[in-house]
Image: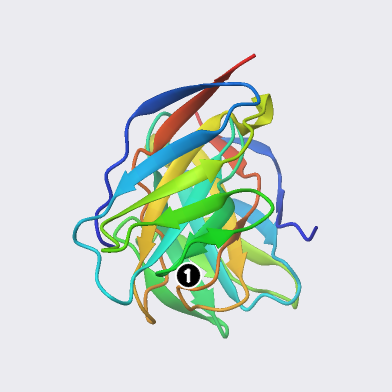
Amino acid sequence: EPEVTQTPSHQVTQMGQEVILRCVPISNHLYFYWYRQILGQKVEFLVSFYNNEISEKSEIFDDQFSVERPDGSNFTLKIRSTKLEDSAMYFCASSVDLGSAYGYTFGSGTRLTVV
Amino acid sequence: DAKTTQPNSMESNEEEPVHLPCNHSTISGTDYIHWYRQLPSQGPEYVIHGLTSNVNNRMASLAIAEDRKSSTLILHRATLRDAAVYYCILRVGAGSYQLTFGKGTKLSVIP
């Protein structure tokens, strides 16, 4: 079954450093998303991306965050200057279409630890 | 997304059926009912969705009340691998990109 692949599985970074989290969505999917889950808390929406631009973003997705689809297969989330509170699991997801009749496929996540 | 209410936790014996309830009394006519689950240390996993009629797939069945104010996810034979947090989510009509996750129901499966 097709999968969403995320790398690395775990990243440790120092506060103030830039990190890039990488995702390879399912090949025929057109919509891409990032979610995060702080330990013990709910899964939260960050951003959605379609046709090489951001479609929707949450309040969490401030100027420190950016997304990019640098080639035909990768989808990245960059955090410019990490803070301790950015420590969380970050999940990439993709869907074939936007409509509410379609499910999302999530990756296994990247655990980001900011020290 | 409209609000849903689920029990915090449930238990089931292995190989028994499990009925996971969800209330969504403020659902509107175009809202789809989606279920996802999250196994420990994994990303959310799509389970099933429906609009008005009951739905079956290889993972589960979804029973939707006639007034659509509640639904039930049915796992026909619980296995240890089904131990997870199950989320009931309403997807509004076109134009909504995000899934709004609540706390879900933590299902424990007893061997």
Task: Report the residue at 25% width, 61% height from top.
Answer: B2
Viewer-side residue, B60 vs A73? B60
Q: Does residue B67 lie above or below B93 as drawn?
A: above
Does residue A15 appear anywhere in the picture?
no
Disc 1: which residue: A48
Q: Nearer the viewer, residue B79 or A55?
A: B79
Q: Is residue B87 visible?
A: yes
Instruction: Decide: is B4 above or below A93.
Output: above
Which residue is located at x 39 percent, y 26 percent? B9
A16 left or right, relative to A12: left
Residue at 65%, 44% (x, y): give it. A108
Task: Give the chain of mark 1.
Answer: A
Q: Nearer the viewer, residue A27 or B37?
A: B37
Q: Position of residue A61 (x, y in %)?
A: 37, 60
Mark 1 crowdedness (10 Å alpha carbons): few <14, some 14-19, many ≥20: many
Instruction: Single out the residue that lies furthest toward the right.
Output: A1
